[in-house]
Amino acid sequence: MASLPLVGLPTDSKPIGSHPFLVVGEKYVRAVVDGAQATPLVLPLLQPPLPAGDWLATLDGLLLTGAVSNIEPHHYGGGNSWPGNPHDPARDANVFGLIPQALALGMPILAICRGFQELNVAFGGSLHPKVHEVPGLADHRENPASSLDVQYGPAHALQLCPDGLLAGIAGGTEVMVNSVHGQGVDRLGESLQVEARAPDGLIEAFRGSGPSFLLGVQFHPEWRVVENPFYLGIFQAFGEACRRYRLHKQVGSP
């Protein structure tokens, strides 16, 4: 495993019993191992943030995971929050420091759900705090009473941009994906390019405009990644970008 690229995954703050814990979903860790063929490295996100320089010097990629929490609205000019809206200030503080440093290094980044929204905000974009309350947009939330297999099962078609990265992975311009989110992109961040939209027009994926691998998706390709060729292809592309980045670092070392 030591020869594999290292992918960093941020933690989330979660109370378990009477104690605070830092956690990361096992499905994301498994997707890095089984899909990207890389070694996962869990990054403890504390408040105040730990210096990220040493982490980033070691990493070959960054996976911004989904989470139960939502980005605090003040980060994107979204006004006041509301009772019951789950937040994780430590994750906000850390991730919005990590992203620009990783971008400056040209490090591959794959961002999923909350991570997708974090990237958009980091690039100056904004979010719909409640997609289901926006006229013309569908309710993209899962049914919490359903089993996980149903919640993460195919929910709607995704329209892929013909010349995009995802269309190349899918081998076409339409694919079925899951839908497990209450927030979504309102204004797209600067220099980000749309990769896919839901049937209601909501942006579901974007990529960066530079040469480095930068992909954000609103759906969850980590779910049973080896069983879904499209999801697996996303993680394989990310893993290959991490290997190229690692090789470039090794070649550039004195």
Image: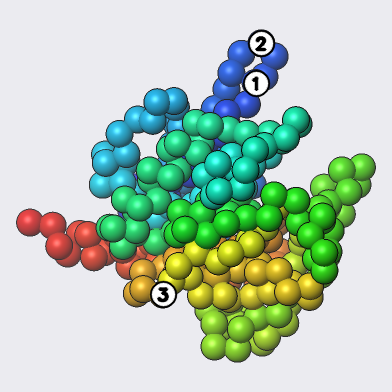
Looking at this view, name the residue that lies furthest to the right: 145
Circle 1/circle 3 CB separation < 8 Å: no
- Rate crowding at label 1 as few (under 14), some (14 to 19) or many (20 or more) other CA atoms within 10 Å: few
Three-letter amino acid code at disc 1? Pro
Mark 3 sits on what residue? 209
The tag on residue 15 is: 1
Circle 2/circle 1 CB separation < 8 Å: yes
The local secondary structure at tag 2 comes to: loop
Q: Position of residue 43 (x, y in %)?
A: 43, 37
- Examine the rendering and report whether any part of residue 88 can be seen: yes
| 100 to 174, vertically: above or below | above
Residue at point 79%, 73% (across, down): 200
> Rounded to the nearest whole Å, what is the CA distance between mark 2 and mark 3?
45 Å
Looking at the image, tell me whether mark 2 or mark 3 is earlier in sequence order. Answer: 2
Q: Quadrant of residue 246?
A: bottom left
Nearer-the-camera pick, 207 or 152: 207
Three-letter amino acid code at disc 3? Ser
Residue at point 75%, 30% (across, down): 83
Q: Nearer the viewer, mark 1 or mark 3?
A: 3
The local secondary structure at tag 1 comes to: strand
Q: Position of residue 29 (x, y in %)?
A: 56, 46
Assign the C terminus to one quadrant of the image: bottom left
> Rounded to the nearest whole Å, what is the CA distance between mark 1 and mark 3?
38 Å
> Rounded to the nearest whole Å, what is the CA distance between mark 2 and mark 1?
7 Å
- Rate crowding at label 2 as few (under 14), some (14 to 19) or many (20 or more) other CA atoms within 10 Å: few
Residue at point 26%, 64% (across, down): 247
Q: Position of residue 228 (x, y in %)?
A: 70, 67
| 93 to 152, vertically: above or below | above
Mark 2 sits on what residue? 18
